[in-house]
């Protein structure tokens, strides 16, 4: 059996949601988004530990939610960093398994079967991805370059990595002061490792803005409850 750890990133403070409560505590279907994910992970035998980087002022609240829902897997809540990348690096230092899955608490619609598919992938490094259904051009105030949409990927989480190789890549990024928006791009930049792309879905959205929460309620009702 593949034994893996999970890092569940929960460090956002919800500025784009225009709320004072971190996004992971906002409710979808009557319960906090972070609970949706932990409920599914609780059912996955291969995941032996969960590390949750949290904003400093919300560590106790996160621990209370875990206790209230009586999750039985070992869950360690740590203080997150100033950035997503720093939070991931801090969590990686606590991982004890040779493989690690990284997910975001604000992507509450990943299915148990999708996490298991990632775990059972033969690749050391894998990510979910989804084709881009619109035209993408390079530029800012003016168009500078055409891009081939057929060769572009909308990267989704969760992602799986060799713990040792991802930790090493993060060490180099921290030493050089380089910033990446997620971990596949960071790993590929420093390690040049092959990363398998698994077919994602349009339902695996990230709750970032108020409209996403409204869309999320529809996804929960029609996709999550409808599939149970």
Image: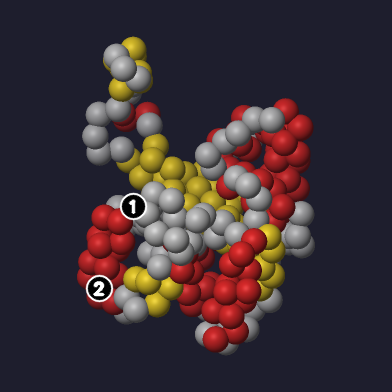
- Could you tell me residue 9's position as x and y percent? 56, 57
Q: Residue at x 53, y 39 (%)?
A: 181
Residue 67, position as x, y percentages in the image: 60, 84
Disc ID at residue 209: 1
Mark 1, Cα crowd under 10 Å, few <14 / some 14-19 / many 20+, is: some
Tell me if residue 108 comes above or below residue 13 in the rendering. below
- Would you say the residues marked 1 and 2 are in contact, meaning their CB atoms lie under 8 Å apart? no
Position of 42 with respect to 144 (left or right) is right
In x, y percent, where is residue 80? Answer: 65, 56
| Residue occupying the point 39% across, 49% down | 16
* Most foreground residue, 47 or 93: 93
Q: Secondary structure at mark 1?
A: loop
Q: CA distance from mark 1 to mark 2?
A: 19 Å
Q: Earlier in the sequence, mark 1 or mark 2?
A: 1
Could you tell me residue 3's position as x and y percent?
68, 66
The residue shown at (38%, 40%) is 154
Quadrant where the N terminus lies? Answer: bottom right
Q: Residue furthest front?
A: 20
Q: Is residue 135 visible?
A: yes
Q: 175 above or below 160?
A: above
Residue that label 2 marks: 221
Q: Quadrant of residue 174?
A: top right
- The reply to whether residue 121 is visible in this rendering is no
Q: Which mark is residue 133?
A: none
Task: Left or right? Give the position of 192 relative to 168.
Answer: left
Q: Is residue 192 left or right of residue 157?
A: right
Name the foreground residue: 153 vs 145: 145
Foreground residue, 120 or 14?
Answer: 14
Q: Is label 2 in a helix, a strand or a loop?
A: helix
Quadrant location of the C terminus? bottom left
Closer to the eye: label 1 or 2: 1
């Amino acid at each position: 059996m593949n034994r893996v750890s999970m890092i569940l990133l929960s460090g956002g403070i919800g500025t784009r949601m225009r709320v004072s409560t971190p996004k992971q505590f906002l409710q979808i279907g009557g319960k906090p988004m972070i609970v949706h994910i932990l409920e599914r992970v609780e059912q996955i035998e291969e995941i032996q530990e969960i590390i949750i980087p949290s904003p400093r002022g919300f560590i106790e609240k996160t621990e209370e939610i875990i206790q209230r829902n009586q999750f039985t897997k070992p869950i360690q809540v740590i203080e997150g960093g100033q950035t997503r990348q720093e939070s991931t690096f801090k969590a990686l230092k606590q991982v004890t398994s040779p493989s690690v899955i990284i997910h975001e608490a604000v992507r509450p619609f990943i299915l148990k079967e999708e996490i298991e598919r990632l775990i059972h992938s033969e690749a050391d490094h894998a990510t979910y991805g989804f084709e881009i259904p619109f035209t993408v051009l390079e530029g800012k105030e003016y168009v500078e370059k055409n891009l081939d949409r057929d060769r572009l990927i909308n990267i989704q989480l969760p992602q799986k990595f060799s713990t040792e190789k991802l930790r090493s890549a993060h060490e180099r990024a921290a030493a050089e002061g380089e910033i990446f928006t997620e971990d596949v791009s960071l790993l590929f930049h420093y390690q040049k490792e092959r990363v398998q792309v698994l077919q994602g879905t349009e339902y695996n959205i990230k709750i970032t803005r108020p409209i996403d929460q409204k869309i999320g309620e529809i996804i929960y009702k029609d996709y999550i409850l409808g599939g149970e």
